[in-house]
Image (cartoon, rainbow, N blue to C red):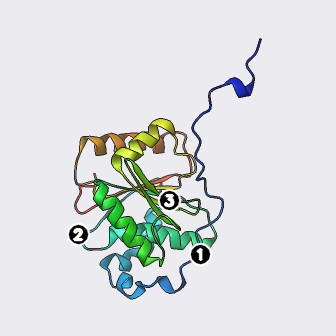
Amino acid sequence: SHASPAARPARPTNTNIPTTPPPAVPGGGPFAEVRHGLPVFKYREEVLAALREPASLVEGETGSGKTTQVAQYLLEEAAETNTPVYIICTQPRRISAIGVAERVAAERGEKVGQGVVGYTIRGETKACSETRLLFCTTGVLLRRLEEDPTLVGVTHVLVDEVHERTIEGDFLLMALQALVKGDRTGLSVCMMSATMDGT
């Protein structure tokens, strides 16, 4: 006898595999002037070039804008080049995952969870079918990796505040390193830090 496909246990699937690019934000959004005044803006093209590699490191002082801007540069480039994208950005704490998501959504002129920008923390998710940038805690991404070890449909993982060394954070970096060094193609992992030795 043989088991029919329906009899096999279902594997967790990612329903957020992007098939369309994110919408463009005209003029850089309602906070364009502020965004263009941030120190990281001068390095926009260099940052985007680095993020085309499988692994990269972005360093910038606190207040440089890397936390709110790097993911937006990816969204903007995807809109300009008509490329589907799905970005996960980890934050070390729940409050920062929510706060950064709300700020980035506001800079795009939208409400968090009702457009391109969403977040997931333990016990709460604000995201929708249009979400292309998901902020989450390190623990949330580790749990997702248990269910979805290749992060199907994800194009970029940004690990913010890597200088804040934690056991969870170290486990996440090891898991992502194994993913990038393995057979998984089409994934770019970027570590973002206030200060870090890149060797």
| Label ID, residue 62 | 2
Pointer 1 or 3: first along the chain = 1
In the depicted structure, whether residue 97 falls above or below residue 152: below
Q: Secondary structure at mark 2?
A: loop
Q: Which residue in the rendered view is the most extreme toward the front?
A: 123
* Residue 69 visible: no
* Residue 169 visible: yes
Q: Disc 1 marks which residue?
A: 80
Q: Secondary structure at mark 1?
A: helix
State the quadrant of the N terminus.
Answer: top right
| Residue found 47% across the figure and 79% down from its top | 109
| Label ID, residue 127 | 3
Numbered disc in front, either 2 or 3 = 3
User: From mark 2 to mark 3, how far is it between C-alphas?
Assistant: 27 Å
Q: Amino acid at mark 1?
A: Glu
Q: Amino acid at mark 3?
A: Ala
Where is residue 69 drawn, in percent x and y? 39, 72
Q: Residues within 10 Å of mark 3 (few under 14, many from 20)?
A: many
